[in-house]
Amino acid sequence: MMGVRFIVMTLLVFVAGGWARVFRDVRALPWTAQAAVYFATGLVTLPVEMMVMTVVGVRWSVLALLALPVAGLLGCWVVERRALSPLNGSRRDESRRAESPPLHYVGLLALIVFASTVLSAAATSGDFVFFWGTKGQHFGQVRMLDAAFLRDPAHNVMHPDYPPLVPLYYAWTMLGSGELDWFGAMASAILFLALASAAVSGFVRDARFTALFASMFALLFIRNSVAGNAEPALLFFEVLALAALLAKNDVVAAIALSGVALTKIEGGVFVLIVVALLWRRKLAAVPLIVLALWLLFAKTNGLLDAYVPNSELSSQYVIPALLQLMREMSFGLWYAPWIAIALMMIGGRMRNAIPYLIATLAFLGFMVVIYARAGAHMEWSAQRVLMTPLAIFFSAATFSMRAADCPSPDRRPGR
């Protein structure tokens, strides 16, 4: 069963992200959204600190990693106590759709089913053992992001240049101990999906979308056996970023997209697509800088092999890859997830969702290019990767409905 250390160290991630309260747009959010933001902020802050300490040659410790985040949190409390208003004049958005308790129960039931499946160890895969968990345990034991360990040819199966956020989270949870809580790491998928659902609830503020999201991705997580892998964390950051864009919360979007960039290779593509098509703000530079710094670290330490396909891309594989990708998009469910989201768009303003639809197609196009080569093994990974364009498509529906509810002409991406 999950150990106390893993639970306590995971709760401290919220503490490490509490400094986000310095932003009044965060303080004005509903508590569900705030919980997601604090965890996302902590889960970006700690790995960034761990990488910086690795570069300067300082081994990790709990106190060293928490010093700055806790100081920032205490500073926020001092500022709030001295302020005339904790919200500093900001107001919560009261123009929300009436909530439907029965639909909340649907989402809660989906999370319970997913949790029971994960806790029975029926929703994980070999990837968790082969590299996500193994890298996390090694990093935690040496208290460094060990580039020499990753460069070892014997460890090539661990994908040395995969962004390190998830293994660093696992390493964080075992500081002071010699072994990873493997059961806890696997069960963290429950927390990621719950917080992603909380982000949808807090930002979108429509119980229909919360119920659909929780039910749909709980099923896809189970079908694709992702517990312990990076997909739950990636989806959490992606959904939080997209929900923040819906609410025009640039600070949260920058934090979440930074997490996306540090979680998986395709996360970097997601960041580039979002910045190019959906979000043209000054803070968009933040996740781009984070992505560039990770690539620089990987390049400097000779860890860029996976960013270049092992086999040559070829135009002769484009059409076969496209056709197979279209089959994989069914998720073995007769395309039900895509159809359900499309149905949610009925009654919305489709024109306002066009940028998100284009972003969805752009990511699908990226997948076709990547798989257009010999030995791509799309059947092994495509359905997991497809959850990212599905999340963008889901955001297209939420933006369409929000635009219908609030038909202000300035509610457009990047404005």
Image (cartoon, rainbow, N blue to C red):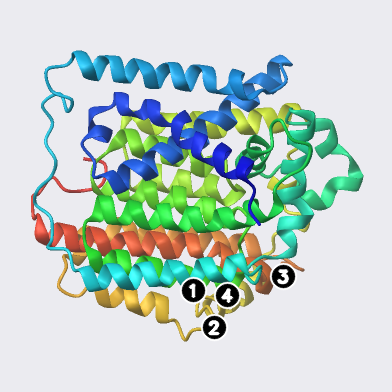
- Which SS class for mark 2? loop
User: Which residue is pictured at 45% across the width and 68% down the height?
Assistant: 112
Q: CA distance from mark 2 to mark 1?
A: 11 Å
How crowded pointer 2 is (Cα within 10 Å; few <14, some 14-19, many 20+) is rated as: few
**Amino acid of disc 3:** His
**Amino acid of disc 1:** Leu
Q: CA distance from mark 3 to mark 4?
A: 18 Å
How crowded pointer 4 is (Cα within 10 Å; few <14, some 14-19, many 20+) is rated as: some
Residue 405 percent location from the top left of the image: 10, 60
Q: Where is the N terminus found, in terms of image quarters?
A: bottom right
**Amino acid of disc 4:** Arg
Circle 2 is placed at which residue position?
332
Earlier along the polypeptide chain: callout 2 or callout 1? 1
**Residue 384 in view in this figure:** yes
Earlier along the polypeptide chain: callout 2 or callout 3? 2
Q: Are marks 1 and 3 in contact (CB under 8 Å)?
A: no
Left or right position of 280 against 258: left
Residue 146 percent location from the top left of the image: 78, 31
- Which SS class for mark 1? helix
The answer to which image quadrant residue 392 occupies is bottom left
**Amino acid of disc 2:** Gly
Circle 4 is placed at which residue position?
223
Choose between 30 and 240: the one closer to the eye. Answer: 30
